[in-house]
Image (spheres, grey):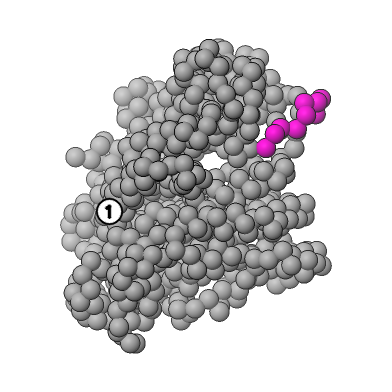
Amino acid sequence: MSNPWHQRILGLFTADLSRLWVACDPDGVLLDEKLLSELRTRGFEVMGYDDPFAFRAEFEERYRAAWDAGEPAPSPALIVHLRRDDANDLPWDILRNARPAVRLILAELFPRLAYSAVRQVEPELLTALFDAHQTELQSARGEGESRDFILEHVYQLTPRSIRTPVDFWREALRLHFANRALPEPFAEHVAAILRGKNLFVGQPLAEWLSSKSALLRVVQDAWYRYLEKLKLEGRRITEPDPPPLDASNAKTKIEIPFDHTDVRAIIDSMFLDGSLHPLAVSSVPASIPGWIRAGIVEDVWSQFALVDKSIDALAAAVPEADAPHKAWGDFAKRYGEMLSRVYDLPGKDGGEWLASIRERIKAIQALSDERLQAWVVARHYADLILQPATQSPVMVHHVPRFLRRRRNAGEARVALLVFDGLAFDQWVRIRERLVASGQSMAFDENTTFAWLPTVTSVSRQALFSGLKPREFDDSIDHTNKEEALWKAFWQNEGLAPNDVMYQRALRQVGQLDALQTEITDRNPKVLGLVIDEVDERLHKERNKQDVALWIGRWLETGFVDRLFAFLLAEGFSIYVTADHGNVDAVGVGRPNQGVIAETRGERVRVYRSESLRAESAVAYSGTIPLDIAGLPVNFMPLFAGGRSAFVPTGDQVVVHGGVSVEELIVPFVKVSGVSGEG
């Protein structure tokens, strides 16, 4: 049964004979994934009205044509979702044929709380806020009181009860471990309260509370220095040595009470999920407390033991088939961190232990693939198209709009670096190289969803154009128009042609001189670069372990170090992502269908006829036909099942195109320079 908040919203959409509805929803209330799912079960589809031309084309093709012909439409009822509060912004024919507009205005739904505070709460958290609003509030609250109320009842944080550093670290770590970073206005509110108590004076508390990556940088450094005090010295894993302590960076040397029970329980879990990195030490005194061992690696066997425990934790964290997309994104990050650790294990020392680890990874892969596929079939993936690109792009075609927001927020120059084919575990290796290079960089790591099928011509073209694939049907089988689409997006945003740059096929150090000269001469405001070394290489290797080794050798050329250092020096905000990832797969045979299949990939084949796809699905058992929202109506993918590929039987390959965590969920990372941090 729906909860009271969902009942409140769903009650506005009654089951009657109306087939066209309008929702005025400036705050994105209706975009809660569980609400969208419940609406779907009641016969409603939600279509966003963001681009009038794209909306009109899709509406006419999928709904108006069916209604005019007296045929069934894709769903019994359509809700036109408008991110404004005035329905008159819609075309006249929509308003004439639709029911009176449903208004979803947070100020009206939460009348006893300040609207400026409520509008900062993520849609998926409004359920908890609505319950508290209905049961705990008797009178209206002002701005500050509203923030206090929301912090307590939504984020379970009561800043006025924080009195000591232990209290703060317990609450800050708990928030981020639960992936509940505070919206920036709430983080500023908490920081002001704590400054009033003379706690952490001069420290960037708001940044620590709103950014998990910022907090982890502080915690990681504090952990290494904590171990130094215990006479445990060793090699930092994936982290460089800090700069010398002097007057310019002394204030960042934060002490964290790791030995306090409330703190160390969370720290232990953060080492297991890959959020924090252990210290490699040569020996451990017998007097060292046992709980510290989660954050140290003494020898190769403790390295194996850490991976073993991490796999246990990861296996328990595989999202369910109805989980929200954020749960899948968090799992993809943890999974990528774990895979990278496994690839670093020494094969000659592992023996049976390494074989056991690999088998357990396969079990996690099989389970996550099964659940992710069910998640896509249940159309949760389709709901991602509607999600706003506010904090981070949910799908790759949201990236240009997100970068536009960042420019409007003051980032004058943005550089989008698309590593073609890069899975999250491979991003970990690039990140570690950048850190080890000695450059002071901060990484704000998120994930985004590629387009299905996860092939370059579909997903990378969507990434650069900001369009859904159905909107570039004429070029969906190649990337020749990619540069033109990228530049068209930004010119529509008011940038001059010379303000926008695009370059592809970058991979060698020798290319950087010409690239840097062109950037210096043209002085672009927006830069789009395609680095394709990973995608080129993965098709030549038999497994991802070998791909990891090759990436390591490629990174030693200095291409990545030099490119990032140059862009940061030129004042660019760097955003790193990929068009798709990749997986290990085993060949099940290459279908011999001539030109029947429009696209003949290694993990997917695309047909322009439903009857041909159905025949192929029967002929090749284990394949999976899926209808993906946002694709052209006559672009019908048939996916290879499990971790199989359409290559000669028994061949071991690294490929992409299918439905798996490694292929579908890719990194989206902001890289920025930092100074004065330890």
The span shown in magenta is 240-248
Q: Nearer the viewer, residue 384 or 448?
A: 448
What secondary structure predominates along the stretch shown in magenta? loop
Q: Is residue 119 visible?
A: no
Residue 408 placement, left or right of 534: right
**Which residue is depicted at the point 43% across and 33% down?**
305
Residue type at tag 1: Glu
Q: Is residue 425 above or below residue 519?
A: above
Mark count: 1
Q: Secondary structure at mark 1?
A: helix
Q: Which residue is mark 1?
A: 370
Query: Residue at 35% across / 22% down in the picture?
Result: 136
Q: Quadrant of the N terminus?
A: top left
Q: In the rendering, at what x and y percent does residue 381 appear?
A: 35, 57
Residue at image point 55% right, 55% down: 549
The correct choice, above or below, for 273 with respect to 380 in the image is: above
Asked if residue 401 lies left or right of residue 235, the reply is: left
Q: Tell me residue 19's x, y (percent).
A: 24, 63
List x then y, in percent, for residue 521.
Answer: 82, 67
- Which of the 4 image quarters holds residue 648? bottom left
Name the side, left or right, on which 200 lies relative to 15.
right
Q: What percent of the width, then of the height, locates residue 357? A: 37, 43
